[in-house]
Amino acid sequence: MIFQYKQKVILYKNLKKLVSLSIFLLFIFSFLFNIQMLNAQFDPNQKVNTASEINSKELFKKGIIAYNDALYQKAILFFKQSLSYNSKNYLSRYMLGWSYFKSGFLQNALFEWETLKSFGFTDNLFLNMLESIYFQEGNFQKKSISKNFAIYQQLNGAKLSKSFFSWPLGMDIDNKNQIYLAGHRSNNLLLIKNSKAEKSLTPFGVSLGYPFDVAFDKKDDFVYVSDYKNNIIYKLTLNGKIVKKIGLDFSNENKLNGPAGIDTDLLGNIYVVDQGNNRIVKIDSEGKFVFSFGKMGKEIGEFFKPVDIMYLKDKKWLIISNSFNNRIDIFDQWGNYINSIESADILEPRGLFFSELGFLYIVNKASIVVYDFNNESITPLSLGTTELFEPYFCIIDKNSNLIVTEPYRQFIDFFIPQDELYMNLDVKLERLDIRNYPLIIAYISVKDQTGRTVFGLSDENFTFNENETTIKRVNSDYSYIRNDYPALNIIVDTNLTMYNYRDKINEIIEKLVTAEPSIAESYYITSELAQIKPLSNEILKLKDAISNPKTYKATTIFDQVFYSAVSSFQQKFIKGGIILFSDGEFSSSSFAIHSQNDLINYAKNNYIPVYVFYFGNGNGKAFLKEMADKTSGYFFEMEDIFYPELAIKLFKSYQPPLYIVYYKSPYPYIPDFFRQVFVTVQYNGRVGKNWFGYYMQEY
């Protein structure tokens, strides 16, 4: 059986390589063809003769420079003027669409691009890009379960000479799509990156006993590892340095006995499956015992060899795999029983994983099933020709891939959704920063065709061509360096009814600034168009304004203030976000210039998450919730508003879908010359590409 299985895996891998090569060659042919077609339709470096063509070309140049400087509304004016001289300047119309898109005016962008199609613009990259935008806008946040998977990679710990692991068990994943894995019998913590064993994070000569499970501290940048052998929980830095051993000072009746699955909540509390004692233990962020619940048995509230635990932040539930009782139990965060999930499809459940789409993945003795809380249904997963042997844990990474550990075979299995196996990538080369020429900084968004961000890419995934010359060396480090510079703008909606919440708002702002003083950038109030900065030096002024009844007006300029707050992040090498306080009581003046959709698209298309603190029950609740959802922010209401530190943590862990890749141009400085840049992105057999350009400015 094992021999036949290996033959199937080898056959599949060879077939996959052949298909990937065919796709890549097809893309290369299409890539060269598109360059020729693009140059034939409009070449900015081609000599023009008439006055209208000269003016159109000069204004196109100014528009490109403004766009690459992230001055999108200024670029709109230049491209419109360029088209007034030559309506068939295809690139001006193409770039006018992009300028509208980045400015939040989606319908204007689509109008320009549809006009371009009607003129016969035949660039395949443009047509693919337009199709993907229509598809993603029409299917935003469509939640569905991938039922069919195909294996694309398999790590065998017994055959690795470097980063050796034995008996792989529990895992957790960070915001860079890197996996931290517990090597149970190799006594170590392993880093998995891009389906490869990157390195062991446990220093030579150090043992973590029998590590069972891994969980990130969602309050600080640490990772916890449960040691099944020594009955403790390790608190480690992300580099593997032991900071604390939790459990050594517990009293005799509270001591751990075989800690297995672990998870943390957003306040830093740790929840542990104390398997040997058949109970659940809660530990606070300081490593102190808080309480425990459960005992051995088969009745409600009792456990028989439980394995894993998940904390659901939205519902504040604890989900526990009650393995030998063949059920999943649900409790609140205080240990009060809520419900159980029982089915013939659940047999000796082990590892649990709650995906970003809201589905619970359950690892059984010989299979994996998915539970949907909305319709209370269970869906078995199909893994193609792969037969699992005693799987234990699984996760869904940020690219929707399924990763499974099989400790008895020393395997880590990587699966891709079957319907995405041959799906191309949606790549947008959004702008080129040439202010430090010959260093070119490219801003690239990479998504799948459903609009989900593709995470975890590195240098080898990108190929650049500038004017048909292949760039030999690129660097994508900036993509992650920018995350080290987070900045939040605070907007307080100051319509008349918001005066009722002034004390709550001041309390929340005080907590925000205390939790992370350096992260606050500026503040705005919607009764006036003014940016006050830096926030840390103006906190008393802001609180006084919030307490002053004269601040609140019957009419506000909400749209202009919000638009200005997003615009303030342009041209800055920072990760921006917005915290918005509002009760949703909007008037006609609130959106006099920019529509609600324009505001949502402006933040979304520039990767600015919005964290809404909602008070009251105004007519704009649906709009504010949609804004938080579509910008990858969060909607706080009711008791959630009293935990503003969570907004800081969520923002710091937010990973924009924008890769920042730089390279050195191979060409000398030539003023008034347009250069085309093409990028190809390859990931797990999928390919995407796009193009953009820049002008050499005259100095």
Image: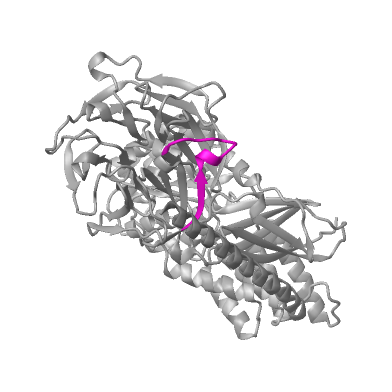
Residue 699 sits in which quadrant? bottom right
Residue 157 colored in magenta in the image: yes
Which of the image's four quarters has the N terminus? bottom left
Tell me what residue is drawn at x 66 percent, y 77 percent. 123
Q: In this view, does 355 lie to the left or right of 152?
A: left
Image x and y of residue 55, in percent: 79, 75
Image x and y of residue 656, in percent: 53, 50
In the image, residue 538 sits, relative to residue 623, either above or below, namely above
Residue 63 colored in magenta in the image: no
Report the number of numbered marks.
0
Residue 534 visible to an observer of this rendering: yes
Image x and y of residue 37, in percent: 73, 79
**Along the line of sight, which residue is nearer the eye, 363 or 511?**
363
Residue 62 sits in which quadrant? bottom right
Residue 81 visible to an observer of this rendering: no
Image x and y of residue 403, in percent: 44, 49
The residue most toward the left is 299
In the image, residue 175 sits, relative to residue 65, either above or below, namely above
The stretch of residues the image draws in magenta is 151-169
Q: In this view, does 45 lie to the left or right of 534?
A: right
